[in-house]
Image (spheres, rainbow, N blue to C red):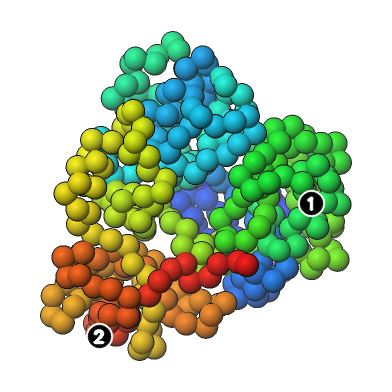
Amino acid sequence: MRHTPLYEEYSRYPGVRMVDFGGWNLPLHYATGITNEHHAVRQRCGLFDISHMGECMVSGPKAGEYLDYLTTNRVASLEDGQIVYTLMCYPNGTVVDDLIVYRLNSEEYWVVMNAANTAKNLKWIIEENPKASLYKGEVKVTDFSDHISLLALQGPKAEAVMAKLSPEAASLKFFRFFSDISINNIRCLVSRNGYTGEDGFELYCDNEQAVDLWKLLLEAGGEEELIPCGLGCRDTLRLEARLPLYGHEISEEITPLEANLTPFVKLDKEDFCGKEALMEQHLKGVPRSLRGIEMLDNAVPRHGQPVFLEDEQIGFVTSGTKSPTLGIFCGFALISRQKGLSFGDVVEIEIHGKHKRAKLVKTPFYKRV
């Protein structure tokens, strides 16, 4: 099992529970527990080790053009220091992965990938996509995944913590970044973004400096009650905020249009991989749709559980939890659009062999003011 550079640091914390996450030994939660960590991020701030994520640099005179073809959102038109969320699709329109792309300059782009998909993504980017041979020699792809650590500082007090260490970084606008910031002599790429539905920052540094940066952030956040947080609350936070998880809301079997990620799919772009299939789906009608569900019966919906309308299965649950913020059992289901269901309509979810009632609701379940 793989470890991040911070493993030796936090594995000694009293009460930490480690889990296997895609072959990585990572903290599910610390002594405070998932619910307390969730509330800390919503109300104050939390610190996550997400160094398992993959990173690569795509560089060269045609790097922007190439990434524009590989992804659904607009990359070539980014400004220096700007970030974009996008998806990478197969020709049939389903999802290879969702990515965060950073433009350093017109010939250098930093690409962040989901950990479990890193090897697959690199193969797709370098050699397997339909236009790979056309850009060979024009674009260079350098994998930095084993050399870079990534920490996420998240919550309404994250800016106050960052301001103590780097007023310049604290002044960043959302989805912007500085590529070279010194934080107590630790060189970092710092961006203002996250995966929790809260304000926050993501900090990249060399592996050798990860422990020092972790300790520095926790010390600086003492007055703001900053605490370390694990994967458990990262999932409940992202779910409340309607942020997709690969393998659940998006996958090799689900298109971005079905996942209600249409704003990140620019069908008016000249070309991108998967455009033809997605345009056809758009014109003919998207067959399935990701919908928010709130349980009417006391039960937790879980990934893969079938969804029924009367006695007919119409879809399945992609993610579910008990929302720590709202105190409700909720989640998402990918269901057929043929039934014309709308908000407030009731469906049934098969949970442990029994049908439990749920209603369709608007999402996100939580949105910060």
Residue wearing tag 2: 354
The extreme front residue here reads: 268
Q: Residues within 10 Å of mark 1 (few under 14, many from 20)?
A: many
Q: Position of residue 100 (x, y in %)?
A: 52, 41
Q: Relative to residue 280, is residue 250 drawn left or right?
A: right
Q: Quadrant of residue 312?
A: bottom left
Q: Position of residue 247 (x, y in %)?
A: 36, 54
Question: Observer-nearest residue: 145 or 298?
Answer: 298
Q: Earlier in the sequence, mark 2 or mark 1?
A: 1
Looking at the image, is mark 2 or mark 1 nearer the viewer? 1
Q: Position of residue 107 (x, y in %)?
A: 56, 19
- From what the image shows, is residue 142 above or below residue 147? above
What amino acid is labelled 2 in the image? Lys
Residue wearing tag 1: 162
What's the residue at 37%, 40% (across, down)? Answer: 266
- From what the image shows, is residue 357 above or below residue 165? below
- From what the image shows, is residue 268 above or below residue 38? above
Q: Quadrant of residue 267?
A: top left
As measured in the structure, the alpha-carbon distance from the residue carrying label 2 to the one carrying label 1 is: 49 Å
Q: Give the number of the disc on residue 219.
A: none
Q: Relative to residue 205, is residue 27 drawn left or right?
A: left
Question: Observer-nearest residue: 262 or 354?
Answer: 262
Mark 1 falls on what kind of element?
Answer: helix
Q: Relative to residue 224, is residue 269 drawn left or right?
A: left
